[in-house]
């Protein structure tokens, strides 16, 4: 830590680093024009960077230049158990590799504090209409995940700087918002004085920006990038595109934060903010509650942004008090923010290279779907969009009268995810609508699997305080978990009779959830499509039972006099919601939940050996293969054959799905051979610590459209399929991968725009790398997936504007070479060898964007680079 610019923080016994003075010394008057993000980055540089280079780094921020990489040192790493566990599996494997080379494995530890929350392992096997659902689901979770939880228990004892919050306690993002983030942290030194600094973090989930609502720079990264940070390396970057988003006006009555964020997601996707840091400002932003801000920040990956920042102001302090932070901590946040210039009032002159304006008063009641979170549809337009189809609704009623499910049946209605359950207004609104529906005698349809899975135990306490818990339970929304569930594809099994009816009648069945992701095939294998909605709308759809329902106009039921009951009769007023929130959400609830949770102190590195005793028959945890087999061989960028030719908007759900494993899938067949009963196959996500299972998930999504595989009429055939060349034989994707692996054939993937949207799962990169993919050429990459590819030693290449797979007429029969020196953003040549003998040279951009990324790629990946550096340092020592 540098001593330059270290000063006493007024009114405290702490010091701080005066980044304002450092910037002003370089260019007087520059600080007032810096955005919030640049100010936090400046402090990080002044406190942590090489003193000889600080001025050069700061000049990038002041002059808005992007010609020099500069380091960012996140204060901590936050993980959920899926990517967090796989990252720690990698580190355990790294210890083995170090030991094999004569190094000391016990010295391989995270340098940066790592907080792992076990929150992504629970499937909703029992719905919210079962009074024992929570206990039953937790018992199933523990049974299925015994191997995983054994390994996680070992990590907290074997590694330094790893803390674990066990299952059943909430979602990482909500816990981060409600307790883990101090907003302003303190580091203590031997001289007796502490240093205050802005909290920053990376998280192994794309929704880590949730906590940006508190003014904390927190971004989602893949497990591989997180490993890089864990092991003490800076996250190198160039000045990001920092965009101001001015919010004007105020929401209309009855409009929830979910409605706002779905409208913003559509708007911001159209404004092309992919990779940008957004800063929400203006009177509209200032008037939003912290819960509303968090709902907006949480969905940053859905509109493609890296971060979604809000300033620190009085609302921030009120929220810290509400969630049980100490008076001393609240005072520190206020003092520090006002001293350094992170307080809202000090940001009025901040300048942005681009400013967008969004009027909150234009937002109407919204949903998103049926396949993408940015595909907004106003509920008043459901009929016009062909979703609320009256003829199909009436036909469905006739089917229902015969004891059948209707076309468009809502088979899953879930109040889930940190997006909405972090916001008390949204949860209370759902509870009040349930109360009103219950009083009117309305019930959910019997085919609807309903559930409530809050991200925090505090939600249960304030619902109990408000007297709304019973009303939700009566409608089938009893608490099934405190975890990430349906939104992550962990919706559990359907009633076998319902599932069989869907199969036999080939029903168009749907899901409605208050989550942030609704990609095809994600929520449940038998829910053909899914819609995002606010928590109260989820309750309404459980009553309606079909997506063919005009939720604003059609009758949800009738009262004793035969009068129709519609949504407007049930919807609570804003005043009623606010009054309940004020009376029922209390600081002592959050203290009751979090104080015991964070009092647990684990002794690290004293009770277990530094090397993990791998269980040979486990399908959950297996020693990683990154130092052996195909990956140990020299790489080649010559003679590549395409594994797949893909279109736009390929998501990480296409690349490596997270939902339930079907018996007919390659992974299902493997698990059956390993002796697992089908009921315990669990999800793809939970098996990512075992590469032999996880490899079989590569491109296993049944909605995949590989343009190399076509029907007789020329249309693309849907499914997990590939065409092996040069034979031209079509087979299941996994068999194609096995065939190419056996041949030692290096592979390439050709794709369209926005490749790698969605969750930050590193197995979307690990899977293709283990399949033998050396490079991916796309029209554009989502940030997190691009860095994951580099972390696995896969070369990302970008077509020049105007060039696509379609303009080049690529059909997958070609072979490819990549020529040129791989330097940051260099122009390389993709040589296409057509089957006809034609040779085509196509200019492409090397998407190794920084020298750090080149270094990682050249080493073969994050882990390989660290192993090389570690062993070299050991020799010097």
Image: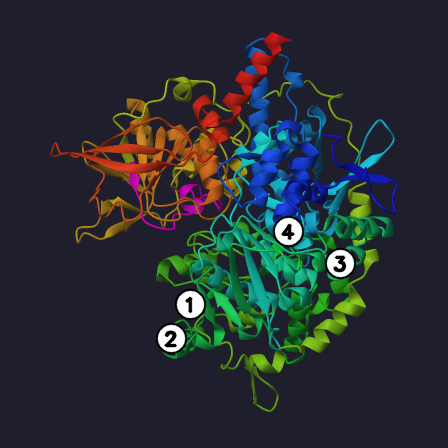
Apparent side of residue 846 relative to residue 4 in the rendered image (left or right): left
Residue 715: x and y in percent read 22, 53
Is the residue under label 2 in contact with that under label 1 (CB below 8 Å)?
Answer: yes
The residue tagged 4 is 36
Is residue 111 something one can see in this rendering? Answer: yes
The residues bearing labels 4 and 3 have C-alpha atoms spaced at a distance of 20 Å
Apparent side of residue 203 relative to residue 826 in the rendered image (left or right): right
Dot 4: element: helix
Q: Nearer the viewer, mark 4 or mark 3?
A: 4
Please tell me which of labels 2 and 4 falls first in the chain.
4
Instruction: Out of 70 and 866, give the one closest to the viewer.
Output: 70
Q: Residue 319 carries which label?
A: 3
Please tell me which of labels 4 and 1 falls first in the chain.
4
Dot 2: element: helix
Q: Residue 408 carries which label?
A: 1
Apparent side of residue 844 relative to residue 50 in the rendered image (left or right): left
Q: Residue furthest left?
A: 836
Q: Nearer the viewer, mark 2 or mark 4?
A: 4
The residue tagged 2 is 392
Please tell me which of labels 1 and 3 falls first in the chain.
3
Would you place residue 500 above or below residue 38 in this image? below
Would you place residue 561 above or below residue 183 in this image? below
């Amino acid at each position: 830590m540098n001593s330059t610019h270290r000063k006493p923080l007024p009114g405290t016994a702490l010091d701080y680093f005066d980044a304002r003075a450092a910037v002003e010394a370089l260019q007087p008057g520059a600080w007032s024009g810096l955005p919030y993000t640049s100010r936090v980055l400046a402090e990080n540089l002044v406190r942590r960077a090489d003193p000889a280079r600080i001025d050069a780094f700061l000049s990038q921020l002041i002059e808005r230049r992007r010609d020099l990489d500069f380091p960012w040192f996140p204060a901590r790493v936050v993980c959920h158990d899926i990517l967090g566990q796989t990252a720690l599996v990698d580190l355990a494997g790294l210890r083995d590799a170090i030991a094999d080379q004569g190094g000391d494995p016990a010295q391989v530890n995270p340098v940066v504090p790592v907080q792992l929350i076990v929150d992504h392992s629970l499937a909703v096997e029992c719905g919210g209409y079962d009074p024992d659902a929570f206990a039953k689901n937790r018992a199933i979770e523990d049974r299925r995940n015994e191997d995983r939880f054994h390994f996680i228990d070992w990590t907290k004892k074997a590694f330094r700087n790893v803390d674990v919050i066990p299952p059943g306690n909430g979602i990482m993002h909500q816990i981060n918002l409600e307790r883990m983030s101090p907003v302003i942290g303190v580091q203590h030194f031997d001289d007796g004085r502490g240093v205050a600094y802005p909290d920053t973090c990376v998280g192994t989930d794309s929704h880590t920006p949730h906590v940006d609502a508190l003014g904390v720079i927190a971004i989602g990264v893949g497990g591989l990038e997180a490993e890089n940070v864990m092991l003490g390396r800076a996250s190198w970057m160039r000045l990001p595109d920092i965009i101001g988003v001015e919010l004007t006006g105020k929401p209309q009555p009855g409009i929830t934060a979910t409605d706002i964020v779905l409208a913003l997601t559509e708007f911001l996707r159209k404004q092309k903010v992919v990779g940008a840091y957004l800063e929400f400002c203006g009177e509209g932003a200032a008037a939003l509650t912290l819960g509303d801000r968090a709902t907006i920040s949480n969905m940053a990956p859905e509109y493609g942004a890296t971060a979604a920042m809000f300033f620190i102001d009085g609302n921030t302090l009120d929220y810290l008090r509400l969630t049980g932070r100490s008076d001393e901590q609240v005072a520190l946040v206020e003092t520090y923010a006002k001293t350094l210039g992170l307080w809202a009032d000090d940001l009025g002159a901040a300048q942005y290279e681009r400013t967008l304006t969004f009027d909150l008063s234009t937002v109407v009641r919204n949903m998103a779907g049926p396949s993408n979170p940015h595909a907004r549809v106003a509920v008043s337009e459901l009929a016009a969009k062909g979703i609320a189809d009256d003829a199909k609704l009436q036909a469905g009623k006739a089917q229902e009268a015969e004891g059948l499910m209707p076309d468009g049946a809502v088979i899953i209605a879930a109040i889930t995810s940190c997006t909405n359950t972090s916001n008390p207004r949204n949860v209370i609104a759902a509870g009040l609508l349930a109360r009103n529906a219950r009083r009117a005698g309305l019930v959910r349809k019997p085919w609807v699997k309903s559930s409530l899975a809050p991200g925090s135990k505090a939600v249960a306490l304030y619902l109990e305080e408000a007297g709304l818990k019973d009303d939700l339970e009566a409608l089938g929304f009893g608490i099934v978990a405190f975890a990430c569930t349906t939104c992550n594809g962990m919706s559990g099994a359907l009633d076998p009779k319902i599932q069989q009816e869907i199969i036999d009648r080939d029903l168009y069945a749907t899901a409605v959830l208050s989550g942030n992701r609704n990609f095809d095939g994600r929520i449940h294998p038998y829910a053909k499509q899914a819609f995002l909605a606010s928590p109260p709308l989820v309750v309404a759809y459980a009553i309606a039972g079909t997506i063919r329902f005009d939720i604003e106009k059609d009758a949800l039921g009738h009262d004793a006099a035969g009068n129709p009951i519609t949504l407007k009769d049930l919807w609570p007023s804003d005043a009623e919601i606010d009054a309940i929130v004020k009376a029922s959400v209390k600081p002592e609830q959050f203290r009751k939940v979090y104080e015991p949770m964070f009092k647990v102190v684990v002794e690290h590195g004293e009770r277990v050996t530094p090397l993990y005793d791998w269980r040979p028959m486990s399908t959950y945890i297996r020693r990683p293969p990154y130092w052996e087999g195909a990956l140990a061989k020299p790489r080649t960028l010559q003679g590549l054959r395409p594994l797949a030719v893909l279109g736009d908007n390929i998501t990480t759900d296409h690349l490596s799905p997270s939902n339930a494993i079907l018996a007919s899938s390659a992974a299902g067949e493997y698990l059956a051979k390993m002796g697992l009963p089908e009921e315990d196959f669990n999800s793809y996500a939970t098996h990512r610590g075992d590469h032999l299972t996880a490899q079989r998930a590569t491109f296993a999504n049944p909605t995949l459209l590989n343009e190399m595989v076509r029907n007789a009429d020329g249309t693309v055939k849907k499914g997990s399929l590939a065409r092996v060349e040069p034979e031209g034989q079509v087979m299941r994707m996994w068999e194609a991968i096995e065939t190419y692996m056996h041949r030692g054939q290096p592979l390439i993937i050709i794709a369209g725009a926005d490749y790698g949207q969605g969750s930050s799962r590193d197995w979307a990169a690990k899977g293709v790398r283990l399949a033998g993919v050396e490079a991916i050429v796309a029209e554009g990459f989502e940030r997190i997936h691009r860095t994951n590819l580099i972390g696995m030693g896969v070369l990302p290449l970008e077509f020049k504007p105007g060039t696509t797979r379609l303009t080049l007429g690529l059909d997958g029969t070609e072979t490819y070479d990549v020529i040129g020196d791989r330097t940051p953003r260099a122009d390389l040549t993709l040589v296409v060898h057509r089957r006809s003998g034609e040779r085509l040279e196509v200019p492409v951009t090397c998407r190794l964007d920084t020298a750090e990324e080149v270094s990682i790629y050249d080493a073969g990946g994050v882990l390989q680079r660290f192993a090389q550096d570690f062993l070299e340092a050991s020799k010097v020592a």
